Image (cartoon, rainbow, N blue to C red):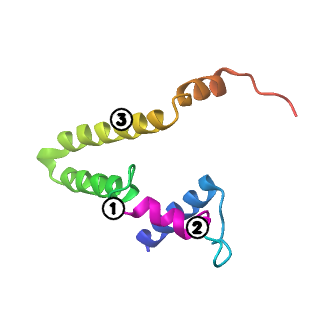
Amino acid sequence: MRVVAIILGALLLLVAVRGTQTDSAPGAGDGKGLWPLLKNDFEPGQQGNFLAWFVAILIIGGIGYVPELKGVSTLLLAIVITALLFSAIKKNPQLLNEAASAVIAPQKAS
């Protein structure tokens, strides 16, 4: 049941980030529906493939179950998270500036 919840959560997050809720009209061929987006995120060989990151985190988590290797697992997980952050920054170089301005900027009263 947990795996289904994780997959459903990842699907909902993907749909929310990409701004699509249903597949495009049949025959439209614009590639902006949910299924083409999922295919691109899970297709082997794609840059930033979600499946590759997910498998890497699962393997590192499995290593963490060995008590003697828990420190190594923590270090590897920190490296993977750092790589994910650098990957996001590479795709959007203004990400750090936007995050800093969001934290520093005062909240506007509505």
Amino acid beneath label 3: Thr
Q: CA distance from mark 2 to mark 3?
A: 28 Å
Query: Given contact means CB atoms under 8 Å apart, are the residues at marks 2 and 3 in contact?
Result: no
Residue in the foreground of this view, choosing between 23 and 16: 23
Q: Tell me the residue that label 1 is attached to.
A: 44
The residue drawn where x is 53% and y is 66% is: 36
- Main secondary structure type of the part rendered in magenta: helix
Q: Secondary structure at mark 2?
A: helix
The picture places residue 4, in percent across and down from the top left corner, at: 46, 72
Q: Residues within 10 Å of mark 3 (few under 14, many from 20)?
A: few
| CB within 8 Å, label 1 to label 3 | no
Which sits earlier in the primary sequence, circle 2 or circle 3?
Answer: 2
Q: Helix, strand or loop at disc 3? A: helix
Q: Is residue 38 left or right of residue 23?
A: left
Task: Please state the extent of the stretch shown in magenta in the rendering.
Answer: 30-44
Question: Disc 1 versus disc 2: distance between alpha carbons?
Answer: 18 Å
Residue holding disc 2: 34
Give residue 46's quadrant in the image.
Answer: bottom left
Question: At 23% across and 55% down in the image, what residue appears?
Answer: 59
Residue farthest to the right, as pictured:
110
Say if 71 sits above or below 96 in the image: below
Q: Which residue is located at x 45 percent, y 59 percent? A: 41
According to the image, label 3 marks what residue?
Answer: 82
Let me know if residue 68 is in the magenta part: no
Q: Quadrant of the C terminus?
A: top right
Asked if disc 1 and disc 2 are in contact, CB closer than 8 Å, the reply is no
Earlier sequence position, callout 1 versus callout 3: 1
Q: Nearer the viewer, residue 73 or 85?
A: 85
Mark 1 and mark 2 lie on one chain; the one further toward the N terminus is 2
Residue drawn at 19 percent across, 39 percent down: 71
List x then y, in percent, for residue 21.
66, 66
